[in-house]
Amino acid sequence: MKLFTRSIFTAIAVVLTVSLFSAAALAADAKYPADTIAKVDEFKILKRDKKDMPESLTGVKIITETELKAWMDQKKKIVILDNRPADEFEKERIPGAVRLNSDDLLDDASLAQKAGLKPDDVIVNYCNGVKCWRSPAVSVLLISLGYKNIHWLRGGLPDWIKKGYDTAEGK
Amino acid sequence: MERNKGYDWSTLWKTEDWVAVWLGFFIIVSILFLYHLKIMDLKKISVDFKWTTDKQITARVPGWKKAMEPMIVEAEAKGETGTVVRLKALQEALTKGERAAIVKASGKVENLGGLPAALAKEISDRTKAEAAKVFSRNNLLWVIIIGAAFYIISVIGRVLLGRNIGKYSAGFPMVFALAWFARFLSGNALPADFGFEYVIFALVVGLLISNTIGTPHWLLEAVQTEYYIKTGLVILGAGLLFFEIVQAGALGIIQALLVVFVVWYACFWMCRKLKVDDEFAVILSSAVSICGVSAAIATCGAIEGDKKKLSYVTSLVLICAVPMMVAMPWIVKQTGIPDLVAGAWLGGTLDTSGSVVAAGALISEAAMKTGVIVKFSQNALIGVAAFILSLWWTMKGGPTVVEKPTVGVIWERFPKFVLGFIVASILFSFVLNLDMVSDTKSVLAEIRTWWFAMAFVSIGLETRFLDMAKMEGGRPALAFVAAQVFNIFWTLLLAYMLFGGYIFPIPDIK
C-alpha cells in the first residue's frame, strides 16, 4: 500500500513537471523560414524588454509620416496595412488603412494573398510606434513571402496623430 | 530516528514546500493549457477592484490638468499640433467633469503613446472606475470562480499534507473573503494616493480581528501564511526572467553571507551580554540573521534545543516583522532609496518570506522581485548554517547530545519551493514561446496576488501583540530587537554597496 501511494504520487509529480515543459512544445509550427521567425522573435523580445525597435530593416524602406501624407494627397496607389488587433484598429487608424494583423499573418502565411496583396504593390506597414513589434514583424514576413516594395512607418499611429493628420475610426 | 536507505521520497508530497511547488506547477500548467486551447480570453480572468467616487474625480481634476501643462508646452515647441489639440480637449472634458466624456477624450490621448498616454491611462482608469463596477455580476462571478478554484486546489494540498479538511473548509471561505475585502478597500482612489495597497489592508484586517475579538478557532486551520505565500512565490517565478534571478541571486548570496555571519555573531554577542543562555542565543541569532522561522526551526533541530524556546522565537519573529514591513517601505519612499537597493534591504532584513513580498509590493514590482531573490539566496543558506551550527554545538558539548552532523542536512533544510520558483522561471525564460509568456503574464500575476493577499490576511490573523507582553523575561526579546536594529543598518549598507552600482553593475530587473 505504501509502495502504491508512493508510486502514484511520484507519477503525478513527474507528470506535472513533464507537462509543464511539454506545454512549450504545443506552440504551432510556423510556415516561415527559421531566420524570419528568429527576426520576429527579436522584435518580440525588444517589446518585452520595453526597448525601441531597430532603426532600419534589411530590404524594408523607411517612410516618414510627412512622406506618407504626401503620397496620400497625390492619390498615389498604395496599400496601407494596419498590423494591430481589431479593437485598436476600430478605435483609431490612419484613413484608408486595411487590417493585416501580425499574429494572424504569423499563423497563416496565405493571408497576404487572400488580402489581395500583389508582389509589386507599394505596401506601408504601421502599428503603435517605435516600441511596437507588429509592423517590423509584418514587414519582415512580407519580404520573406516575396513582396518587393515594403515600407515601414516606424513612428506608427502615435507620430501620425502628433503631426495633426486626420484619422479614421469604426469598423 | 528511523531512516530509509537513500532519500525519503515521501517528502515529495508530504512537506509543505513540495506541495507548494506542485500546486504552483498545477496552476501554471492549467493556465498554459487554457491558453493553448484558446477556450477563453485569459486576460478576462481579472477582478476589478478600482473604484472612484465623483467627488474624488473632481478633487483630482486640478492636479491632472496641471500635469498636462508642461506636456502641452513641449508639444507646442516641437510643433506636434495633434498632441496639443488632444491634450486641450482632455483638459476641457475634465473641466466639464462628465465621466463618459473624460474617458473618451483620454482614450484619444492614449493613442499618442509616451508620457501623455501614461497620464491619460491613469485618468481613464480612475474615471471608468465607478463603484458599481466592482459589484457587477461579471466581477463578482470571477471572484467566486477564483475562490472556488483556489479552494479545490489548496484542499488537495491539505489532503496530501494529512491535515484536517473539515476545519480547513470551514475557515477557507472566511480567509478568502477577508482577502477580497482588503483588496476592495485598497481599490478606492483615496488609499491608492497614499500608497496604501492591499498589503496594508490585508494586514490590518487580520490584525484587527486577532487583537480584538481574537481569531476564532474554526478559522485557524485556514490561516496558513506559509502555505499561501510559497504557492504564490512559485507562481512568481514565472514572472521573473532567469537572467534576473542569476544577476540578483549572485549579489544576493554575497550579501547573504556578509549579513548572516556578521549579524549572527552580533546577536550572539548581545545575548551573552544580556545573559541569555547559549541555547536560546543560538536559536535567536539564527532567526535574526538568516530568515526567521524556518532558520529557527532548523537551528533548533540542529542543536536539538528546547521546543518552548523555539515557539517563543517564532512569535518574536512574527511580531517584529509587522511594524518593520510597514515602516521600511515608508522610509524607502521618504528617503528615495533606489528600488533595487530597497528590495535587497528588505530581503536581507525581514525574517519571513511573506513580509518581504508584502513590504516589496508596497514599493514597486522591481523591489519586490529583488527582495524575494535576495531572501531566497539567504534561505538557501539555512542548511549550511544548520550544518555548521550542529558541528560547532557537538564540539562545544552542548547540554544535549546531538546526532553526528552530516552534509545531508544542507539539502534537508534547503527550502524546496525555491526550486519550483527557479524551474518556473527557466520555463518562462527559455522554453515557452514569447506569445505564450506575454499573454499569460497578467493572469498569473492576478492569481499570485490572490495567494499573497490570503497570506497577508493570515499574517494579521496569527499575530497577537499581546503575546509579546506575556513572554517570559523579556531579555531575549531585547536581544532580538537590538540585533534586528543592527541588522537593519548593516544590511542597508551592504545593499547600497552591492545593489547600488558601486562595485557591481546594477542588475536589470523590471
Image (tube, helix red, strand yellow):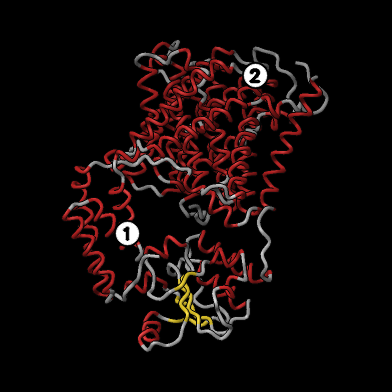
- Above or below, B303 against B181 in this view is above
Chain letter for mark 1, please.
Answer: B
- Above or below, A60 against B322 in this view is below
Determine the secondary structure under disc 1.
helix
Q: Residue B481 vs residue A110: left or right?
A: left
Residue in front for this viewpoint, A58 or A158 = A158
Please identify the residue farthest to the left as the structure is shown: B96
Given the image, on which type of amino acid does mark 1 rest? Gly
* Residue on which disc 1 sits: B107
Given the image, on which type of amino acid does mark 2 rest? Gly
- Above or below, B311 against A156 in this view is above
Chain letter for mark 2, please.
Answer: B
Q: Residue B260 vs residue B400: left or right?
A: left
Inter-mark Cα distance, 1 to 2: 53 Å
Q: Quadrant of residue A71?
A: bottom left
Residue in front for this viewpoint, A142 or B87 = A142
Nearer-N-terminus badge (1/2) = 1
Q: Position of residue B246 (x, y in %)?
A: 60, 50
- Report the quarter where the N terminus of chain B lies: top right
Residue in front for this viewpoint, B229 or A17 = A17
- Above or below, B8 against B24 in this view is above
* Residue on which disc 2 sits: B162
**Residue depicted at 68% across the width and 16% down the height:** B397
Determine the secondary structure under disc 2.
loop
Q: Residues within 10 Å of mark 2 (few under 14, many from 20)?
A: few
Q: Position of residue B94 (x, y in %)?
A: 20, 55
**Between marks 1 and 2 in the image, the one whose residue lies nearer the viewer:** 1
Residue B52 image label: none
Q: Quadrant of residue B424?
A: top right
**Residue depicted at 45% across the width and 22% down the height:** B479
Res B257 visible: no
